[in-house]
Amino acid sequence: MKILIKPRLLSGGVTPPPSKSMAHRMLICAALADGRSTIENIDFSDDVKATLRCLECIGAGWKPAAGGGVEITGTAGRGADGTRTFDCGESGSTLRFFIPIALALYGRGRFAGTGRLMKRPQGPYLDLFMEKGINFSYTGDTIEISGGLKPGAYSLRGDVSSQFFSGLLFALPLLGGESALSSTTRLESLPYVEMTRSAQARAGIRTDGEGGSYSIRGGQSYAPFSASVEADWSQAAFWLMANLLGSEIELQGMDAKSAQGDRAHGLAIAEAIGDKEVKEVEIDISNCPDLLPPTAAAAAARGKGFVTRFSGAARLRMKESDRLASVASVINALGGRAEEEPDGITIYGEDGLRGGVEISCCGDHRIAMMAAITAARCGEEIVLDGAECVNKSYPGFWRDYKRLGGYIEELGQ
């Protein structure tokens, strides 16, 4: 879908969608329980739909519940035999979470995906499973695994994705004995691991440790629970950064005490970029990689003479797009100046951006939203190609954008 966006600053109140990251985690914990759970405030994004499909592969059932939630009937993995293909769509979380779960429950699994998903790194699992005697193979566009997941010591790199740690944390409590899980490097995106442990705690699962080193008692059982998914601070960042570009948006329905890492990081980065007394800002994005696109947009129009350097971002090259290349491409196309580096990106601020171009969203939801908030500060209209990709995480984004006063005209395919 192509859309035309005319420059127009945004204003009004908006509540970002429920946290996709927490929704994945709560849904999985509910599916692993033996009984009925209710998860309220679910946004049926493409990634969440992928996790719901995979719940069925482990024998769980689900149906919409009143008020925008879902009711999950968990079977503790006893309702299927692991022979069905786990269709993960383009969701990296779904794929990496369910691989160890399938091994723990059935000793095998077959996984498929779309877009760039099956090309995204799986090295930490591949190395670990080879050490443990578990078969892990790519067969065309699928991944096939087989072998027993046994209690014991599990060590893997933590600088590729914290999702590998979350996947093992879901699975290891189901085994018969005690296990230990540790990172051989600094564990990046640590707050996401803590989100996993928080969701597990609601289901009665205990894991001990911190900072990338955990002990997990075996023989635990997930218990049914009821919970509501809070609003997503990673999506809120787009509206926060739109304000630095001149809009006046009030975030509503946010949990000021949220454990989401993107809350504290997003607020801190917004303060740093908004400080006109500091000409050069350096931001380590390793613990909050999803914040790069919106914060890069704000940095691009920070003003002449301002420089923002982002580091710790090499793994963003294997997201839905090569996000370092995509972010730089969008900013440069709009008349800004961004220099891509191996581990990050440097952005030289301008007083405003030109616009007047057509931009590809690169099949990446966060690139589409980044371009949209930047368009409000451009001198001329822009055209976005592939704008429907926001459905991956924020299906209501264009509705909210228009409600805040943005001008959008759909041009067709």
Image: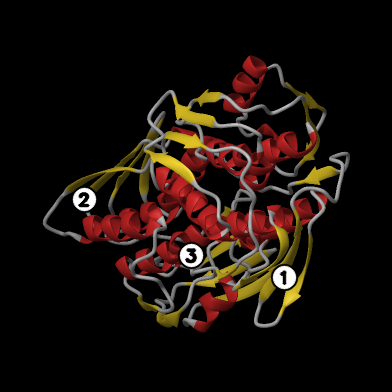
Q: Earlier in the sequence, mark 2 or mark 1?
A: 1
- Counting other residues with Cα less than 10 Å from the Cα at mark 2, is it few (<14), some (14-19), or many (20 or more)? many
Q: Is residue 286 left or right of residue 206?
A: left
Q: For this view, does 227 lie left or right of residue 150?
A: left
Task: Residue 45: tell me if it is visible.
Answer: yes
Q: Earlier in the sequence, mark 2 or mark 3?
A: 3
C-alpha gap between disc 1 and disc 3: 21 Å
Front-lying residue, 113 or 79: 79
The residue carrying mark 2 is 306
- Give the total number of marks visible in the rendering: 3
Nearest-to-viewer mark from 1 and 3 = 1
Specify the amino acid type for callout 1. Glu
* Residue 127: image location, x then y, percent: 60, 19
Residue at mark 3: 232
If the image is split into quadrants, where does the C terminus sit?
A: bottom right
Tell me the number on the disc at residue 71. Answer: 1
Element under label 1? strand
Q: Nearer the viewer, residue 169 or 178?
A: 178
SS type, badge 2: loop
- Taking the spot 32% from the left edge, 62% from the top edge, the residue there is 352
